[in-house]
Amino acid sequence: MPTIFFYGPELEKDKRRELIKAFTEKASELTGLDKSSFVVYLMETDADEVGVGGELLKDRLKRQYEEEKEDIKKEYEYKEFEE
């Protein structure tokens, strides 16, 4: 029985249904196996429980947010200077 594991953020029930349906349909299409043979697990994970590039995902997202915020601030200051 083919099994699909998806580790990701918490999703609303409708989104979980949609994701399970999409995974099942695509896997069935690509393998030629009947949809009823697939099992899909959605494993909700918090950004404190995931590492990306050697750092906690939560820390990485915070850093990216701060960098984007600084870029927006610089862009705004530049536009202000032009006027």
Image: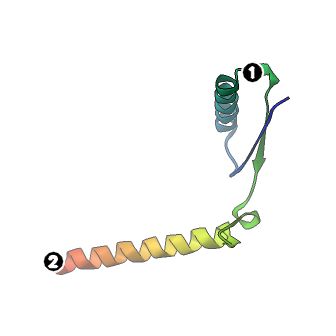
62 relative to 42 in the view: left or right: left
- Identify which amino acid the numbered label 1 is placed on: Leu
47 relative to 80 in the view: left or right: right
Q: How is the image coloured?
A: rainbow
Quadrant of the image occupied by residue 23: top right
Circle nearer the N terminus (1, 2)? 1
- Identify which amino acid the numbered label 2 is placed on: Glu
C-alpha separation, residue under disc 1 versus residue under disc 2: 61 Å
Which residue matches tag 2? 82
Position of the N terminus, as image quadrant, is top right
Question: Residue 70 at what x, y percent from top left?
Answer: 41, 77
Q: Nearer the viewer, residue 72 or 40?
A: 40
Position of the C terminus, as image quadrant, is bottom left
Q: Residue at x 67, y 45 (%)?
A: 11
Quadrant of the image occupied by residue 76: bottom left
Dot 1, how many residues are within 10 Å of its Cα: few (below 14), some (14-19), or many (20+)?
Answer: some
Q: Residue furthest front?
A: 31
Q: Nearer the viewer, residue 31 or 60?
A: 31
Which residue matches tag 1? 33
Above or below — where is 16 with respect to 77? above
Quadrant of the image occupied by residue 33: top right
